[in-house]
Image (tube, helix red, strand yellow):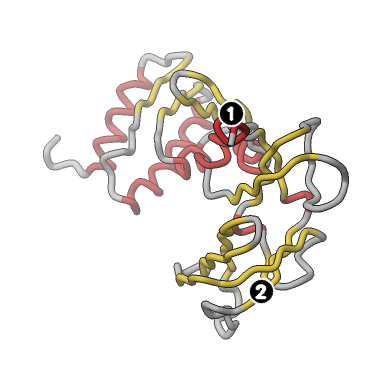
Amino acid sequence: PRQLSGGQQQRVALGRALVNQPRVLLLDEPLGALDLKLRKQMQLELKRIQHEVGITFIHVTHDQEEAMTMADTIAVMSQGHIEQLGPPEELYERPATRFVAGFLGASNLLPGVVEGPDAVRAQVDGKSGPVAAGVRPEKISIGRGGGVNELPGTVIETAYIGVATQLVVNTAAGTVHVFAQNIDSGGRVPAPGSNVILSWSPESTFVVDQTEEEEEE
C-alpha cells in the first residue's frame, strides 16, 4: 500500500466500499489529501463510477468547485441547517440566501429596497422591502451593451488571473468585482483610475433578503 499513489489508494478504498453493493455510499472529504491536478482528475472519475454503478453517493466536501463539478443535487449547510437544496445550476444562478450566494462562488450584493420596476431590474421572486440585489462577477460587462442594468464607477484595482482579469470598481452602490474574460489576447483592460460603465441583464440578477443586522442599521 505504501507504494501506491494517492489516486491509486483512493481507487482501492472505493473498490472495497463498492464490493458489498450498498444502496448509499457516504464519502467524507475523499479527495482532500490529493494535490490539485489529481483531485480534478478524480472528481471526473468518481462521477463516472457513480453513474456506472448506479449507487447514490453522498459526498461531503468544503470545496465548492468540487461540489459543483460532481453533484447532481447539492445541499448547502450552515450550522447544521440546510440553507438550500437543488441542482448546482439552480443554487449558483438563483441562491436563496446571502450565505448560499457567498458560499458558492463570488457575488456582488448591492443593498436596496424593492419599490417598483425601475432602478436595478431583477427577478425578485416575490420579495419586497429591504433586499440585496446580487450579480456574479463574470456576468458583468465593461461598457454599455451587457444589459439594461448600468452602474458607473471607477476602477481602483486590476489583477490578471489567466482566464480572466479581475477588476475592482468603486461605485455609488459600493465596491463591485468584475471578472472580464481574456478572450482576445490583445484586448485592453481599463487601468486603475479609469471611469467605466458596468452593465448586466435582469436574468443575471438575483435577490436575497438582507440580514437582520443590516436591516437594523
Q: Amino acid at mark 2?
A: Val
Q: Amino acid at mark 1?
A: Glu
Residue 136, image x and y in percent? 62, 52
Residue 67, image x and y in percent? 48, 37
**Would you place residue 58 above or below residue 157 in this image?**
above
Residue 215, image x and y in percent? 62, 33
Q: Is label 1 or label 2 in front?
A: 1
**Would you place residue 33 above or below residue 164 in this image?**
above
Residue at disc 1, secondary structure: helix
Total labels drawn = 2
Q: Residue furthest right?
A: 117
**Quadrant the N terminus occupies:** top left
Q: Which residue is mark 1?
A: 212
Q: In the drawing, what numbered circle is on residue 196?
A: 2
| Residue toward you, 138 or 28 | 138
Q: Residue furthest front?
A: 217
Residue 45, image x and y in percent? 43, 41
**Quadrant the C terminus occupies:** top right
Quarter occupied by residue 75: top right
- Horizontally, residue 151 falls left or right of residue 85, namely right
Q: CA distance from mark 1 to mark 2?
A: 33 Å
Q: Residue furthest bottom?
A: 186
- Horizontally, residue 44 falls left or right of residue 154, namely left
Residue at disc 2, secondary structure: strand
Q: In the drawing, what numbered circle is on residue 154?
A: none
Q: Residue at x 60, y 26 (%)?
A: 85
Q: Residue at x 42, y 20 (%)?
A: 25
Q: Residue at x 59, y 68 (%)?
A: 180
Quarter occupied by residue 145: bottom right
